[in-house]
Amino acid sequence: MAIDSRRMDAFFRPASIAVVGAGERPTSSGGAVLRNLRVCGWGGRVIPVNPKGGVIQGLPAVTSLREISPPADLVAVLVRPEAILDVAREAAATGHRNLLILPGGFSEAGEVGRARDAELRTLAAAEDLLIGGPNCGGLVNVLDADARFAATFFRDVPAGGPVALISQSGAIAEEMIAASHRDGIPLGAIVSVGNAMHLDLADYVDYLGADPQCGAILLYVESFGDSDRFQAVAARVSRRKPIIALVGGRTSAGREAAFRHTGSLAMTSGATDAFCAAAGVLRVATLRELRLAGKVFGTLPAGIGQRVLVLSNSGGPGVLAADAVVQAGLQLIDLPLDLAATLRGMLPPEAAVANPMDLLADAREDRFGPVLAAMLDRLRGQVDAVLMIHVVPFMVDAAPVVTALAAVTGSADVPMLHTMMGTLEGRADWFAVLESAGVPTFGDAEEMCVAAGLLARRRRWLIDPSPGTAVAATP
């Protein structure tokens, strides 16, 4: 059953949060949640709840939910499993209706856990409690840089941006948070689903699908819960924004591991491909591809066409890019004869005027910039994306090249992707200049081409959304 978006707002955009089990130590779960609320700069009201009262991490604490008036929008529960039912009863008695329960000890925890799960479900139904989790890592919403929220005990919050991740694994969520900082993935929301007592994949996809701050949704999934409902929600949302899923259990060994992890029965890989196709979900095969999807769909959510041009200043990476382009299902266009003649007049005789283009290692801004501009002008309407490879040898100052490329790409009407290779002492600054111009950047040419292939799969599906169109995982 669909959840009212106003109730979901309490989990993503609360004005107040009570942290039951709050602690002084940031290495405790309750202490970590308080720390992350502070670190992310959330401006709402934080009420630590601990039987000892006092002051916790600089905030006045209360001894129970009964002391909080009006009730908090959200209650984060971080007490031992056997105490959670008492917290839920107190929440129900005091008007607190929305609970994010992070600890486990429920359906995944044997007979005792299943009994606890059943009792909590009964209480929630009787008292109109809405529960996120249990057995989850929490929730982070920094999609809006001016309203950052983090009710989680993850070690960090993501870098921010228009991409959301909904994960059935806390470890995958932690890795994607780290990758958002390491690789520049514009990740702005993390949802750890946990046992999904009430809020499941479909609820989160539905809510984030309607959020104008969210431009793309990533999933790590082992099972889809109510598969019919998920499929219906995803099919609707995927017409507006891309949904990219890494589905665990591609092999029999993986499906057995998924059952041990969550107790769920994963679909066969073929059945998962068909399911994703019907839902409009672009399936990826590896965590690497999920990271690359997060990188490119945050900037280019509508994807790209198949016709690409590779502009390089090195032969070897150009060769690898040519192979990777074909393997990704893209098409290297032929250069028109008049354009080739123009470019030969601009370049040294030994440059390779073809696709891939090799400007030679000593290419500086006076070669990169004019050649790119000339190609864009002549190929308008004939190329769907430009993939740029910039190897930085010792004799060339990369900064002016980057500045020139950013100036051209900033006014271009063709999507650009860029990779820089070599010893890059200014990598962070150079990548920042390009990404501020709307150009996703990568550490090697092959990854750039894989990312471009994912974008092309999205565009093919938007053009022809019939089941089976370019959404299955790559072999």
Image: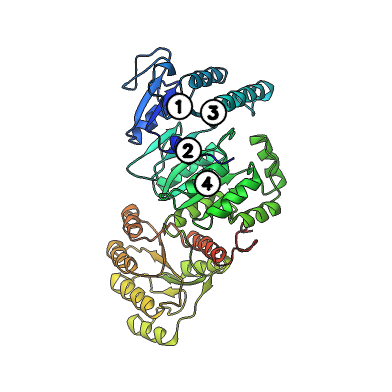
- Viewer can see residue 395: no
Answer with mark 3 or mark 2, whichever residue precedes in sequence.
2
For marks 3 and 1, give the one nearer the viewer: 3
Image location of residue 376, percent across then percent down: 38, 75
For marks 3 and 2, give the one nearer the viewer: 3
Q: Badge 3: how crowded within 10 Å, few (<14), some, or many (20+)?
A: few
The residue sitting at the top extreme is 52
Q: Nearer the viewer, residue 167 or 392?
A: 167
Image location of residue 72, percent across then percent down: 41, 26
Quadrant containing the C terminus is bottom right
For marks 3 and 4, give the one nearer the viewer: 3
Three-letter code, disc 1: Val
Image location of residue 175, percent across then percent down: 49, 42
**Depicted 245 relative to depicted 158: above or below:** below
Residue at image x 44%, y 60%? 300
Image mark for residue 206: 4
Q: Badge 2: how crowded within 10 Å, few (<14), some, or many (20+)?
A: some
Three-letter code, disc 2: Met
Three-letter code, disc 3: Asp
Residue behind mark 1:
75
Quadrant containing the N terminus is top right
Three-letter code, disc 4: Asp
Residue at image x 34%, y 67%? 409
